[in-house]
C-alpha cells in the first residue's frame, strides 16, 4: 500500500520566502561587519572604573552586591570566566546586539509590519555608533536591552497571550531586573498595561509569579549576606541624590534623624554626582553612604511629598536633555556621544584592578585604538548617531500607534516611556540610560501602520502565489503516483479477459489509465491555481470522478 508522500518545497517557493527578508539580511551582514571593525579598532575592550571591575570581581566571587550592581550581568561574565578574556566578553555582547536586532525584526514581521518597516526599525540598534561602543564595553546595558526586547517579543508574538508566554515574559523581565534594577517598576508597568488590555487573569497570574519568584529568591540570598530582604542596597541613596537638586528643609521640616541629610551647601552639576561628592551630607555620616540607605530613602520620600512640583520640574528638565540636537554632557565630566577616539587609555592605580587582572584576565589594560579601523569609526560616529529630535519623532509615532492600535502598540510604547523617565525619576539623566529606549520606541513606532495596507496586500498575494505553485506541484506528483500504482493490463490477464474475483471495472488499458491520470493532474493543477485556500477539496475533486477500480492500492 502506498502512503501519502510529501515532497520538498520547490525552489521557487523557497526563493520567494527568502526574498521577503533580503533587506534585513543585508542590513544584518553590514551590522556584523561594523562590529568586527569595532573589535579590531579598539582592544581589548572598554573598561570603566569602577563599574566594569565591580562586575568582573563579582563574577569571580558571586555575592549579592549592596551597591548599584545586582547579580544578573556578573552571571554572564562568570559563564565566560573559563576563557579569561574580556575580548571574548565584547564579542559575545556584539552577538547579543545582533540577536536583539533580529528579535526586533521578527516580532514586527509577525505582527504584519512590511519588510522595509521592520528592517528600518532595527537600523538604530544595528548601526548607531553609540550601540557599537556600548557592546564593546564591559557594562550590563547590552544584556539588559536584549532581555527587555525579548520579554516584549514573547508578549507580542501572538494576538492572544497564553499562560506559557506570560510566564516566559515574566522570567525575562525578572532577569532584566536582576541586571538593572530599573526593570522592577517596568515589571509592574507591564502588568498594568496587560490588565488594561484585559489579557485575562491566568496570563497575569503567570506573569506575576514567574517575575516574582526569581526576585524573591535573590532577595532571600541578599538577606543572608546583608541582613535584610531586598534587591539592592542603593535605591535610597539614588533617590536621595535625586532630591538634592531641589530639597528645601525649611519646607520639608524633617525629624532630627533625617535632618542630617539636608543639603549642606555642597553644589555639583548633576543629581547623580551627589552620590560620590565627598562633601555631600550623606557621605559625611559614619559607615559610608550605603550603610544609611534606609535613612536616605525616608528623607527622599519626605522631600518629594513636601515639594512634588519641584521634583516633577527637575525630572522634566533632565529628561528633556535626551531631545537636544547636540548631545549635552550630563554631568560635565562625561562624554555624551562620539566617544571613539584615537590614542591609548590608562587604567587608574587601584587594588581592585590588580585583583581582577590576576583572577579574570591577565591581559586587562587600557583601551588602545588600532588604525585604520579606529580611524574609520571616528569618522563614522558623526554620521551614525540618532539625534535627539529624531528620538522625539520616534516616540511621537509610537504614541500615535498606541492610540490607533492599543492592543499591540501600547505595551512597547509604555515600556519605552518608562525606560526614558524611570532612571531620571529615581536618580538622574544619563545618555547611556537613553540607549535602551531606542529599540523599544522603534518597535512601537513601526506598528503605527495598521495591517491591510497596500504593501501588506501585495505581500499576501505573493505568498498566496507561492503556496499555489507548491500545492499544484504536490497534486501532480500525487496523481502520477496514483496512476503508476494501478495494475497494468499485461500483469493481470490477456487483453479483454477478466481475472477471477475481479470485476470488469477493475481492469483498464494503459492508454486509458495514463489518460485519466493526466486528466486528474490537470484538474488538480487548475483547481489549485484557482482556489489555493482549499487544496484538499481540489484534490478530492480530481480523484473523485475516477472509476471505482482506479484506486491507489495494488491489487
Image (cartoon, rainbow, N blue to C red):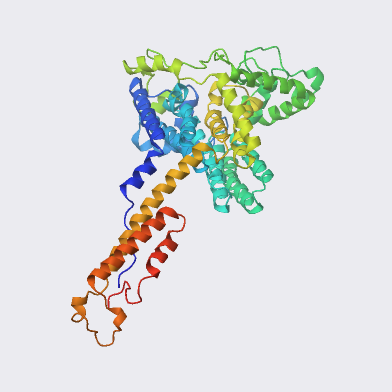
Q: Is residue 161 above or below residue 67?
A: below
Find residue 406 and report its image quarter. top right
Q: Does the image show residue 260?
A: no
User: Residue 33: where, in percent of width, then height?
Assistant: 35, 27
Q: Residue furthest bottom?
A: 500
> Could you tell me which residue is drawn at 37 percent across and 30 percent down?
32
Q: Does the image show residue 403?
A: yes
Q: Is residue 404 above or below residue 389?
A: below
Asked whether, in this view, residue 344 is left or right of residue 214, the answer is left
> Could you tell me which residue is drawn at 66 percent across and 41 percent down?
193
Asked whether, in this view, residue 189 is left or right of residue 304, the answer is left
> Could you tell me which residue is drawn at 56 percent across and 23 percent down?
391
User: Residue 448: where, in percent of width, then height?
Assistant: 58, 34
User: Residue 323: where, in percent of width, then height?
Assistant: 59, 19
Asked whether, in this view, residue 503 is left or right of residue 229, the answer is left
Q: Nearer the viewer, residue 471 or 116?
A: 471
Find residue 289 and report its image quarter. top right
Amino acid at each position: 500500500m502506498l502512503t501519502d508522500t510529501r515532497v520538498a518545497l520547490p525552489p521557487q517557493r523557497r526563493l520567494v520566502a527568502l526574498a521577503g527578508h533580503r533587506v534585513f539580511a543585508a542590513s544584518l551582514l553590514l551590522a556584523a561587519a561594523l562590529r568586527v571593525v569595532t573589535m579590531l579598532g579598539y582592544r581589548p575592550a572598554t573598561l570603566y572604573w569602577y563599574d566594569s571591575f565591580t562586575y568582573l570581581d563579582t563574577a569571580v566571587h558571586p555575592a549579592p552586591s549592596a551597591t548599584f550592581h545586582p547579580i544578573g550581568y556578573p552571571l554572564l561574565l562568570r559563564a565566560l570566566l573559563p576563557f579569561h578574556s574580556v575580548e571574548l566578553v565584547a564579542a559575545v555582547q556584539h552577538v547579543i546586539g545582533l540577536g536583539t536586532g533580529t528579535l526586533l525584526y521578527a516580532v514586527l514581521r509577525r505582527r504584519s509590519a512590511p519588510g522595509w518597516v521592520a528592517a528600518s526599525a532595527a537600523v538604530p540598534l544595528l548601526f548607531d555608533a553609540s550601540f557599537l561602543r556600548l557592546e564593546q564595553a564591559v557594562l550590563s546595558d547590552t544584556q539588559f536591552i536584549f532581555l527587555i526586547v525579548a520579554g516584549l517579543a514573547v508578549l507580542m508574538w501572538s494576538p492572544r497571550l497564553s499562560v506559557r508566554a506570560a510566564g516566559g515574559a515574566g522570567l525575562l523581565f525578572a532577569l532584566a531586573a536582576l541586571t538593572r534594577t530599573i526593570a522592577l517598576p517596568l515589571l509592574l508597568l507591564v502588568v498594568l498595561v496587560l490588565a488594561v488590555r484585559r489579557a485575562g487573569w491566568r496570563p497575569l497570574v503567570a506573569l506575576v509569579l514567574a517575575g516574582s519568584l526569581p526576585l524573591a529568591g535573590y532577595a532571600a540570598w541578599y538577606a543572608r549576606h546583608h541582613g535584610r530582604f531586598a534587591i539592592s542596597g542603593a535605591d535610597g541613596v539614588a533617590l536621595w541624590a535625586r532630591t538634592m537638586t531641589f530639597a528645601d528643609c525649611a519646607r520639608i521640616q524633617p525629624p532630627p534623624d533625617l535632618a542630617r541629610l539636608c543639603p549642606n551647601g555642597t553644589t555639583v552639576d548633576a543629581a547623580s554626582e551627589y552620590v560620590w561628592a565627598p562633601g555631600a551630607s550623606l557621605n559625611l555620616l559614619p559607615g559610608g553612604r550605603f550603610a544609611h540607605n534606609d535613612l536616605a530613602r525616608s528623607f527622599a520620600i519626605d522631600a518629594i511629598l513636601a515639594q512634588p512640583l519641584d521634583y516633577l520640574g527637575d525630572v522634566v528638565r533632565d529628561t528633556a536633555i535626551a531631545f537636544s540636537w547636540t548631545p549635552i554632557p550630563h554631568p560635565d565630566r562625561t562624554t555624551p556621544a562620539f566617544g571613539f577616539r584615537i590614542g591609548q587609555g590608562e587604567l587608574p592605580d587601584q587594588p581592585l584592578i590588580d585583583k581582577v587582572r590576576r583572577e579574570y584576565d591577565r591581559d586587562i589594560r587600557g583601551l588602545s585604538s588600532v588604525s585604520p579601523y579606529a580611524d574609520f569609526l571616528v569618522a563614522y560616529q558623526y554620521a551614525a548617531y540618532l539625534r535627539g529630535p529624531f528620538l522625539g519623532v520616534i516616540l511621537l509615532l509610537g504614541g500615535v500607534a498606541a492610540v490607533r492600535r492599543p492592543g499591540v502598540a501600547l505595551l512597547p510604547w509604555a515600556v519605552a516611556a518608562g525606560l526614558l523617565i524611570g532612571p531620571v525619576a529615581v536618580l538622574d539623566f544619563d545618555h547611556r540610560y537613553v540607549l535602551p529606549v531606542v529599540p523599544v520606541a522603534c518597535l512601537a513606532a513601526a506598528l503605527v501602520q495598521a495591517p491591510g495596507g497596500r504593501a501588506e496586500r501585495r505581500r499576501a498575494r505573493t505568498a498566496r502565489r507561492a503556496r499555489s505553485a507548491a500545492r499544484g506541484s504536490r497534486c501532480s506528483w500525487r496523481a502520477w503516483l496514483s496512476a503508476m500504482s494501478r495494475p497494468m493490463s499485461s500483469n493481470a490477464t490477456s487483453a479483454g479477459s477478466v481475472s477471477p474475483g475481479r470485476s470488469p471495472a477493475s481492469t483498464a488499458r494503459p492508454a486509458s489509465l495514463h489518460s485519466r491520470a493526466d486528466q486528474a493532474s490537470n484538474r488538480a493543477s487548475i483547481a489549485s491555481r484557482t482556489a489555493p485556500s482549499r487544496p484538499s477539496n481540489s484534490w478530492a475533486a480530481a480523484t473523485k470522478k475516477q472509476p471505482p477500480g482506479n484506486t491507489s492500492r495494488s491489487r
